[in-house]
Image (spheres, rainbow, N blue to C red):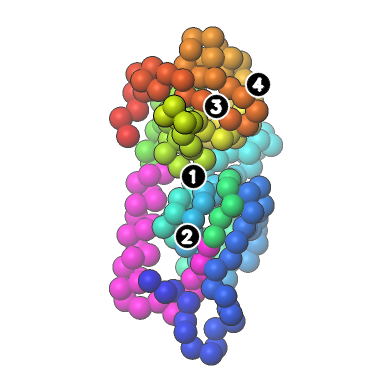
Amino acid sequence: MTYISPTPTSTYTDPNRTVRRGQTLYYAGDAAPSLYRLESGLMRAVRLTPQGRNLTVRHIRPGDIFGEECLHGTTRGHQVVALTDAVLTPIHPQHLSQGELWDLTRSLSHQLQRMMTDGVHIQDGDLRERIARYLLNLADSSLGGQHPDGTRFVRATHELIAEGTGATRESVSKLIGEMRDDGLLNPAYRCLTLTDEAGLRLLSGYHG
């Protein structure tokens, strides 16, 4: 489905935009001239807490349409950062057909349901359980991968896990060490191997 108007009035000669891992697409307070559809990669929306910590409030997966502030005529409410290299398509609402508007509605509704589920995961249970849930969730995203022996891994830092679980990096690092000692994880630089995925699922109550 093409969201960019094919007429000569379009300002985009190439509708796709690439954002490299670690780069920011936009910041809170920026103008919001368009929506975006994530074509590939993984991104996250981040909000700064009153305590000065970053908190991940939303993960953006391929197929998601985001940047809905432009529908309300407001500035951006979050900083959006690429967790992997990402390809996006800008979407201008005034160019959407009725069918494309319905696709937009379904995408936003699906993301709302996912955010509510993620919110429960962040708040429910102790931090050890929340870390297990978050890692299993990331393993199913573009940050996940698989070793030759079939064991899955997640490319993530302790800081990213802390921001995704509403915790401090120090608390996460301590529990990652304990989970390693228990044989659940094998941490390496920016990578966590899920050595006992069944044990992680039992700990987390994760059924996805």
- Label at residue 192: 3
Eyeballing the image, is 178 above or below 5? Answer: above
Q: Earlier in the sequence, mark 4 or mark 1?
A: 1
Determine the CA span between mark 3 and mark 4.
Answer: 17 Å
Q: Residue at x 47, y 16 (%)?
A: 184
Q: Earlier in the sequence, mark 2 or mark 1?
A: 2
Looking at the rendered structure, the kind of residue marked 2 is Glu
Quadrant in which residue 189 is drawn: top right
Q: Nearer the viewer, mark 4 or mark 2?
A: 2
Quadrant in which residue 149 is drawn: top left
Looking at the rendered structure, the kind of residue marked 3 is Leu
- Label at residue 142: 1
Q: Nearer the viewer, residue 23 or 70?
A: 23
Looking at the rendered structure, the kind of residue marked 4 is Glu
- Mark 3 touching mark 4, by CB under 8 A? no
Q: Is residue 134 visible?
A: no
Residues in magenta? 88-115
Q: Is residue 167 visible?
A: yes
Position of residue 207 in the picture relative to residue 174 (left or right) = left
